[in-house]
Structures are given as structure tokens and as C-alpha cells.
Image (spheres, rainbow, N blue to C red):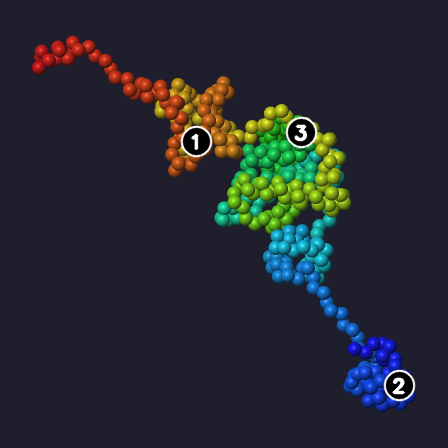
Amino acid sequence: MLSKEDFAVIKALQKRGVYLKDMAAEMGVHPKTIRRAIDRGSAPRRQRQSRGSKLDPYKETVDRLLKENVWNAMVILREIQAEGYAGGITVLREYMAPKRELRPSKATVRFETEPGKQLQSDWGEIVTQIAGEPVKVHFIVNELGYSRRFHFWCTDCEDAEHTYEGLIRSLEYFGGVSEEVLVDNQKCAVLEHPNRGKPHFNERFLDLAEWYGFTPRACKPYRARTKGKDERMVGYVKGNFFLRYRSFEGWVHLNQLAERWLTEEADQRVQGTVKEVVAERFAREQPTLGPLPKRRYDTSYLETRHVAWDAYIDVRGNRYSVPDQLVGQIMTVRIGLDGILRIYRQDDQLVATHTLKSAREGWSTVPEHHAGLWRKTLQVEKRSLSVYEEAAKWS
């Protein structure tokens, strides 16, 4: 291939009137090469060979995820890393940039809180695969206002008992209690909240607040954006965790993956507003949190039951035994979210414990509970032989 220096020689020879054939002989190339250089007016340009990108083998996966409306670069990065991608996120973002759709966002004024001041709580829901079946998952997100560190817990219901359980699990995850907890106006926490006036909190929620030492707060009616930090985290969980993980073996597996993802991903992110790693910011907030109580609050369902003549009580379509001396009495029943049924006398003495069972599994019986009943059943009335002798005389 001719160089720039070769073309300079050709131009000089051309000015002197040297024939193409002689130029070619002097340059050691074919005459046609000389002709093309003269017609082109320059030496041939060296074309760079494009080097392949580490992303090339994974672009099909990236495009598929984009078609599925997955636009979070970190989620896509984890997906292709699982397939063997060894590159960085910058190359991925550059590839996604021309494809990304612009999305409008609403501007809002953010309310910043002091360390340890406030925790915001909210529920979200999503349908995902559990044990191979589509299941609606309810998840409670609790976020500290200062550090933006959050925790979420997944379950099958968002009633009062599950709300309290999710909040307690988050406080235990943080290792302390914030000064106040801000909730939406759901009935498990707020019974009534007039447009002008103080909210009327659920009595058991007040009991929980006193137990853990926080002040309950409620959003103003129709102003859920008051706790916008936490609502944004609901979307963050949907757009990150539930896109990264799309199927689970069971509820335990789901929550185990959630806590691992929180530690490895959510805690290590640089928060967009404060421009700081969440885990580092939390390290300054954690000492300002109040201490956890020595004994955990009981989030069990609390009910009462009447003991039947056969020393059983009815709970959720099945029957469970109690000691036979309690027949006819009223029992206090605690149904734990862990599936354990605990039965108490009116003086709070625990008298029986069972694992909840479905109706098709049959009644749950502890043999010792019915020992007295069996003794009464097996007793045979004893009569004097004289009764039978007298009867024989008259026969």
C-alpha cells in the first residue's frame, strides 16, 4: 500500500512528465496503482479495523430486556453478568442511551429530616412466581428519612398484624427505633383523619408505638406524597428487585433473597438526592436511633374461643385439643404469623400449643389432653351379685 511519502514522490515524477509505467517500475508497484493514486488525489487511507465490544455477545439479552420494558441499567447488568459478561456498566449505558425513552417526571420539594428523626412506611404489591404459580405479593417498605436506608418484607396479606410485623422486622434490621413513624391513612394504623384535625389512631397501633417508643404520624388526607421518599422506594423495589428476581421457591426463599439484595445492592447505591452511599450515611444515623425493647411485641391475631364438651376448640376450619378440665371455659387464642397456635386461660396461663393445619389434614390432638375423658368413659358400674340372685328367683 502506498504511503503519503510515496504519493509525494508520484506527484514530483508526474510534474517531471515521467510515464506511469516508469513511475510504477521505480516505486515497485503496478501502473494501475499509480493511476488510482493520481485519480484519487491522495494516498489510500488506512481503514481502522473495529474492535469487538465485550458487550456484543450479550446485546441480544439486553435488547430482549428493553423490549420487556426493563430500563434499569443495574438490573440488566446483573442479568448479563449471570450469563458471563465481564465488562462494566458504562459500556452498557452507552449502548442503552440512544434507545432509552425520555420519561417526564413531576418536580416536588423534598423534606429532609434529621438523623434518627423519622421512618416512613408504605405498602406495595406485585404479581410474581412462587413455587411455579403466579401469586400476588404484598410487601411493606420502611425507609429511614435521613440515610434513605430501607427494608422491605414480603407476605400474602397487608392487614394490621402483618403491618405491625413488617414494621418490627424493619426496626430489628436497622438495629434501633426512629423518633417517629409516618404512615398512610390505612385502617390498621389510622381509624379516622379529618381534613382539619388530629388523626384518630388504631388503639393497637398506639400500643405498638408505646412498646417501641416512637411517635405515630399520619399523612394529611389526599397528600400521600408527604411520604414521597418511601413511595419512591416501592417503585424502586418493583423496578429493581422484582425484575432481577422473577421466581421463588417459597416465601422464605423470597425474603432471604430480599435481605441479600438489600445488603449487596440497595445499601451500596449512591442516593441521587444526597449524593452519598446509603450504607455510609446510615453509619452516621444508626447511633441516633433509640434502643429496641428487651421483649418483642406480639403481632399474633388475638381471639377468644369456647371449649366444647369434647375438649376441642374450633380455629379456621379445624379443631384443636385442650386439657379436658377446661371444658366449657372461654380461652384466649393467639394465632401467630409463623403458623403457631397458642391457647391461654383467662389468667394468661399457656395451656396448649399447636401448629395450624388445614381442614383436610384432620384435627390436631394431644393425647394427654383427653386422659380424663377416657378414664370416665372406661369406668364400668359395679353391682352386687345379690341383685342377679333375686332376679333369678322370680324367673
* Badge 1: residue crowd in 10 Å (few <14, some 14–19, many ≥20): some
At mark 1, the secondary structure is: strand
In this figure, what is the number of numbered marks?
A: 3
Rounded to the nearest whole Å, what is the CA distance between mark 1 and mark 3? 34 Å
Q: Quadrant of residue 364?
A: top left
Q: Position of residue 302 (x, y in %)?
A: 51, 28
At mark 3, the secondary structure is: loop
Q: Position of residue 289 (x, y in %)?
A: 70, 31
Image vertical order of residue 135 relative to residue 302, above or below: below
**Is residue 259 found left or right of 318 in the rendered image?**
right
Viewer-side label of 2, 1: 2
Dots 2 and 3: beta carbons under 8 Å? Answer: no
Q: Position of residue 217 (x, y in %)?
A: 67, 33
Q: Which residue is mark 2?
A: 13
Image vertical order of residue 193 relative to residue 64, above or below: above
Taking the spot 84% from the left edge, 85% from the top edge, the residue there is: 26
At mark 2, the secondary structure is: helix
Taking the spot 39% from the left edge, 23% from the top edge, the residue there is: 369
Closer to the chain start, of discs 2 and 3, is 2
* Observer able to see residue 340: yes
Rounded to the nearest whole Å, what is the CA distance between mark 2 and mark 3? 94 Å
Q: Amino acid at mark 2?
A: Leu
Dots 2 and 1: beta carbons under 8 Å? Answer: no
* Observer able to see residue 333: no
Q: Quadrant of the N terminus?
A: bottom right
Rounded to the nearest whole Å, what is the CA distance between mark 2 and mark 1? 107 Å
- Towards the viewer: 268 or 221: 268
Q: Amino acid at mark 3?
A: Phe
Q: Which residue is mark 1?
A: 315
